Amino acid sequence: MSQYALKLPDSLLDAARRLARDENASINQLFVTAIAEKISALDTEKLLRERAKRSDLIKYHNALSHVPDVAPIHDDDKI
């Protein structure tokens, strides 16, 4: 495992300490989790953009044309 010295504004460090305490976690755990979540979000966005480039709007509309236009069965499914 590697180490990295991180410079933070005091206000951000104070907020991190408060949140770590509230979550019953160490500041290190909080930072590692936050970084992992951010990396995951950015990787997912990149993946979705790459997949969108391969999309075919005509095929999409064709597939949708086969879906029946009916009201949702459950009230929770309504938009």
Image (cartoon, rainbow, N blue to C red):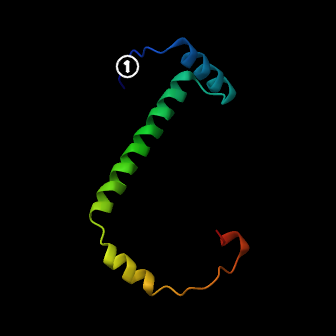
Q: Position of residue 18 (x, y in %)?
A: 65, 21
Density class for disc 1 (Cα within 10 Å; few <14, some 14-19, many ≥20) is: few
Q: Position of residue 31 (x, y in %)?
A: 50, 27
Quadrant of residue 41 within the rendered picture: top left
Instruction: Give the residue at the far right of this rendering.
Output: 75
Q: Is residue 47 above or below residue 15?
A: below
The tally of labels here is: 1
| Disc 1 target residue | 3
Q: Position of residue 56 (x, y in %)?
A: 30, 72
Quadrant of residue 62 within the rendered picture: bottom left
Q: Is residue 48 above or below residue 57?
A: above
- Residue for point 66% across, 28% down: 24
- Residue for point 70% across, 69% down: 76
Q: Position of residue 28 (x, y in %)?
A: 51, 23
The residue type indicated by label 1 comes to Gln
Instruction: Give the residue at the far left of this rendering.
Output: 54
Left or right for 35, reference 76: left
From the image, which quarter does the C terminus lie in? bottom right
Q: Is residue 77 above or below residue 17?
A: below
Left or right for 16, reference 8: right
Q: Is residue 37 above or below residue 28?
A: below
- Badge 1 marks a residue whose secondary structure is loop
Foreground pick, 26 / 34: 34
Quadrant of residue 59 within the rendered picture: bottom left
Left or right for 73, reference 45: right
Foreground pick, 51 / 24: 51
From the image, which quarter does the N terminus lie in? top left
